[in-house]
Image (cartoon, rainbow, N blue to C red):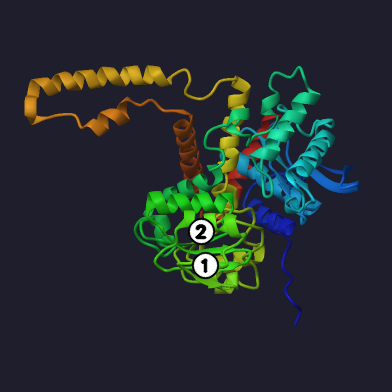
């Protein structure tokens, strides 16, 4: 009997795309145009470090220019390759279309383990990589806008932004060449937490719909739901933290490179994060059962499973043993196409990556708009908003004096009502609205068509239809 081969990440994206377009009425030529990457640039450059020349290989793929600029992160990892970058760029196209961010899809990567280099060396490497991309217009506020991804952070984005401004000294919009920058260098409040916050907002919206909750075999709200998180990086940490602190979910399992922690009564996410930062892993953490086999915890019983690290962690080898009735893909491509088939047959509901982790690109969009407008959100309207609220409070207090002890304003109400929204509150509000509207659009396809049986296919159909509409409007 022939062994069933696991599809690659690139093949998984193509298979899922094909499943969706088979249910759509798209001209074959346009279907192919949308599926394939427009272009991929490979760069090999040298940097003299530690007394000798080191050669690095990097990529920047542009999947679709139905809207410009194109948008997508830059990741630093030894596993980076052209197929992975092109698959991620395709996901960015659909993700941006889904959440109405006016970008095409792009992605970049550098074959490097950032842990092997000190900060000064990483800065030299990053600046040279940025130089190679900038001089070919593969980083530009109007053409191609990167962001952080696995292995990169606001630090690398600040270096790239500075490199761009050095090479384009008269570009008044130079800060908009990249998003995910530090707050004091053109960044925006709430960007670091954005993807994890988006996961929380996605789950909240899911649990607003009884029909969807029932499809996953669950009941009630997020309160008390048992959650296992695979990967406590930036995304997994913030998702787990907010779900625990604000929605009263119970984080029963956390899986990392050196094993996993499990405590059915719940883990303190901040304490685990601090332990990982200090010790380099979860091994030795008190107040939990440690398992050297993280895969075993991935397959443990829970209500919600959040894969928040690498692609393909749920695949043909373990899909049958996954017991979570609801999976939300905080990472890109954590469930392979083959595993997706198995899980759907089991009745598992999967909230797909192109929607679930779109919080990052949504807030990146807000940052890009902020950089182009050259003004922080809330600066113009915040005090005017407070003044209008003061009029209402003054009138209520006048009524309060008239009624005496029969009625009075609560001090906490007055304090909250009088405070105008700052940038962080506006960003969170915009992200919440985006995640709500996008989910409602997906579920309309999911429940509105007899031939669509899962959220992933619904998301692909909705996103691709928007790309098709954009190309048709351009006469393509």
For label 2, the SS is helix
Q: Is residue 425 above or below residue 312?
A: above
> Where's the C terminus, which quadrant?
top right
Q: Is residue 144 above or below residue 26?
A: above
Name the one closer to the observer, 141 or 33. 141
* Quadrant in the picture for residue 267: bottom left
In the image, which disc is placed on residue 137?
none
Q: What x and y, as percent, mark residue 120?
A: 76, 41
For disc 2, the neighbor class at 10 Å (few under 14, some 14 to 19, many from 20) is many
Residue bearing the label numbered 2: 272
Name the one closer to the observer, 135 or 47. 47
Whether label 1 touches label 2, CB < 8 Å = yes
Q: What x and y, as percent, mark residue 80?
A: 77, 53
At 37% from the left and 20% from the top, the residue drawn is 385
| Left or right of 414, for residue 252 | right
For disc 1, the neighbor class at 10 Å (few under 14, some 14 to 19, many from 20) is many
Q: Is residue 469 above or below residue 395?
A: below
Residue bearing the label numbered 1: 261
Q: What x and y, as percent, mark residue 76?
A: 74, 49
From mark 1 to mark 2, how far is it between C-alphas? 9 Å
| Left or right of 175, for residue 137 | right
């Amino acid at each position: 009997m022939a062994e069933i081969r696991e599809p690659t990440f690139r093949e998984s994206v193509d298979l899922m795309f094909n499943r969706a377009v088979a249910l759509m009425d798209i001209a074959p030529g346009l279907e192919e145009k949308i599926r394939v990457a427009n272009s991929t640039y490979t760069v090999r450059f040298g940097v003299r470090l530690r007394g000798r020349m080191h050669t690095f290989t990097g990529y920047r793929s542009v999947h679709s220019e139905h809207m410009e600029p194109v948008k997508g992160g830059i990741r630093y990892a030894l596993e980076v390759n052209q197929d992975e970058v092109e698959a991620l760029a395709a996901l960015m196209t659909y993700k941006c279309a889904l959440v109405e961010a006016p970008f095409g899809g792009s992605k970049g990567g550098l074959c490097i383990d950032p842990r092997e280099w000190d900060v000064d060396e990483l800065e030299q490497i990053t600046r040279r990589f940025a130089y190679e991309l900038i001089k070919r217009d593969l980083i530009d506020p109007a053409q191609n806008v990167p962001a952080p991804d696995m292995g990169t952070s606001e630090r690398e984005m600040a270096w790239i932004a500075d490199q761009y401004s050095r090479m384009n000294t008269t570009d008044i919009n130079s800060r908009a060449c990249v998003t995910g920058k530090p707050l004091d260098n053109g960044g925006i409040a709430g960007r670091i937490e954005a993807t994890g916050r988006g996961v929380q907002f996605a789950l909240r919206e899911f649990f607003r719909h009884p029909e969807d909750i029932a499809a996953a075999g669950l009941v009630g709200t997020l309160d008390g739901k048992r959650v296992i998180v695979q990967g406590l990086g930036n995304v997994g940490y913030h998702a787990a933290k907010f779900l625990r602190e604000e929605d009263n979910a119970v984080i029963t399992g956390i899986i990392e490179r050196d094993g996993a922690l499990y405590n059915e009564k719940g883990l303190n996410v901040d304490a685990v994060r601090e332990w990982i930062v200090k010790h380099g892993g979860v091994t030795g953490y008190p107040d939990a059962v440690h398992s050297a086999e993280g895969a075993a915890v991935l397959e443990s019983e829970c209500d919600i499973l959040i894969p928040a690290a690498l692609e393909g962690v749920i695949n043909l080898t373990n899909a049958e043993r996954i017991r979570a009735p609801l999976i939300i893909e905080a990472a890109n491509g954590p469930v392979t196409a083959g595993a997706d088939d198995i899980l759907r047959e089991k009745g598992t509901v999967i909230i797909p990556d192109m929607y679930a982790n779109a919080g990052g690109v949504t807030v990146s969009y807000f940052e890009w708009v902020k950089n182009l407008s050259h003004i922080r959100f809330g600066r113009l309207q915040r005090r005017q908003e407070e003044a209008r609220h003061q009029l209402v409070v003054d009138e209520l207090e006048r009524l309060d004096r008239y009624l005496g002890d029969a009625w009075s304003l609560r001090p906490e109400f007055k304090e909250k009502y009088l405070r105008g929204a700052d940038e962080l509150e506006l960003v969170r509000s915009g992200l919440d609205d985006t995640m709500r509207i996008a989910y409602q659009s997906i579920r309309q396809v999911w429940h509105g068509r007899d031939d669509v049986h899962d959220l992933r296919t619904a998301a692909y159909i909705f996103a691709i239809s928007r790309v098709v509409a954009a190309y048709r409007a351009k006469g393509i």
